[in-house]
Image (tube, helix red, strand yellow):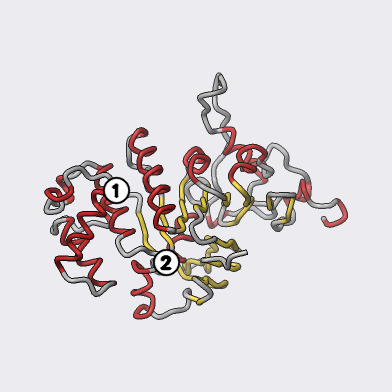
């Protein structure tokens, strides 16, 4: 077995408020292997993006890591000061945001931004860095890359800007890329192209990916393993094929039933009734129990931990032995 590239152990993220500490991510643990595409899926407010931000050290105050550890290649990185984390961000961990304009400076050409990033993390000359940037733009599918390198972000469509951001994230061959809803703002046809591009480039460069999304269809198409989050906790984790075919947790089942299929005729998609609870109002017991069609008495009292059920790990009382309740 190869050593995991990334280890997240018992991660807890809190927000300090006047009412006290609100727990936004609670006891989240997972590992990622080199070159693996690991999906994190759930509704808005599940804690997916906060988990990604904590890994790369971009949590905005008053958010903070209250407990747990994050290790990259065996080195703990969650407690590093800004000066030590900054070179890791970009060189070892890249980030792709939902809106490409948050990553691109509108005042500079994309060439200048790529060259600056490459030179920050390598000792390439300007000429070499520019040549590398042109090759990257061509690799991510920007037509006439030699000419377009001197264009500004506003001169590109949304899909093309996201390709530029992928080039920016990959330009110094990071070990890991965190892609936070990288296709949400794009047309469906462009979404498929961007996901296929990201998968191909990461396979060729040997880069691991954390793909954060609310779209289970995107995960089913692109990830090797998936973690399902609900109200700040992991409720299911396993290989994508297993989770798609036989999801165990009632919430994960609901997400699977919401995937439209070209091969099966469906009169309508199933929806999960209700909404994700607010951080100030997370129910006692299993947080999903008010919306769960399979809720039993203990679900309202005690919170289940993740347990192994064959190939899938699931946090649900339906899978615990009766005497363990």
* Residue located farthest toward the right when viewing the structure as drawn: 323
Rendered view: 68 above or below 223: below
Rendered view: 204 above or below 10: above
Residue 268: percent from the left, percent from the top? 54, 22
The residue at the point 31 percent across, 50 percent down is 99
Q: Residues within 10 Å of mark 1 (few under 14, many from 20)?
A: many
Q: Residue 12: in sight, yes or no?
A: no
Question: For residue 304, what is the image quadrant?
Answer: bottom right
Which one is earlier in the sequence, the residue at label 2 or at label 1?
A: 2
Q: Quadrant of the C terminus?
A: bottom right
Residue at which label 1 appears: 140
Residue 72: percent from the left, percent from the top? 49, 71
For this view, does 155 lie left or right of residue 103? left
Q: In whole angstroms, how far apart are the C-alphas of marks 2 and 1?
A: 23 Å
Residue 185: percent from the left, percent from the top? 33, 42
Residue at which label 2 appears: 56
């Amino acid at each position: 077995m190869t050593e995991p590239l990334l280890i997240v152990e018992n991660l807890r993220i809190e927000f300090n408020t006047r009412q006290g500490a609100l727990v936004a991510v609670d006891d989240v643990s997972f590992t990622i292997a080199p070159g693996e595409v690991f999906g994190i899926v759930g509704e808005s407010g599940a804690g997916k993006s906060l988990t990604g931000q904590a890994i790369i050290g971009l949590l905005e105050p008053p958010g903070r890591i209250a407990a747990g550890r994050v290790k990259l290649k065996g080195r703990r990185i969650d407690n590093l000061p800004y000066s030590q984390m900054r070179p890791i961000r970009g060189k070892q961990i890249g980030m792709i945001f939902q809106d490409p304009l948050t990553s691109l400076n509108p005042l500079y050409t994309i060439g200048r931004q790529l060259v600056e990033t490459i030179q920050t993390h390598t000792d390439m000359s300007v000429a070499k860095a520019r040549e590398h940037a042109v090759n990257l733009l061509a690799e991510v599918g920007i037509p006439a890359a030699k000419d377009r390198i001197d264009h500004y972000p506003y001169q590109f469509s949304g899909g093309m800007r996201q390709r530029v951001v992928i080039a920016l994230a990959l330009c110094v061959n990071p070990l890991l890329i965190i892609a936070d809803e990288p296709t949400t703002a794009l047309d469906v046809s462009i979404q498929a192209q961007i996901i296929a591009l990201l998968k191909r480039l990461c396979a060729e460069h040997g880069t691991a990916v954390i793909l954060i999304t609310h779209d289970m269809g995107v995960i089913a198409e692109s990830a090797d393993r998936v973690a399902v989050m609900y109200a700040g906790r992991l409720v299911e984790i396993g290989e994508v094929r297993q989770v798609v075919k036989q999801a165990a947790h009632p919430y994960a089942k609901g997400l699977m039933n919401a995937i439209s299929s070209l091969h099966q005729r469906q009169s309508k998609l199933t929806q999960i009734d209700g909404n994700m609870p607010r951080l100030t109002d997370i129910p006692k017991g299993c947080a999903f129990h008010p919306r769960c069609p399979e809720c039993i008495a203990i679900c309202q009292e005690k919170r289940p931990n993740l347990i192994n059920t064959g190939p899938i790990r699931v946090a649900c009382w339906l899978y615990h032995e009766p005497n363990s309740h």
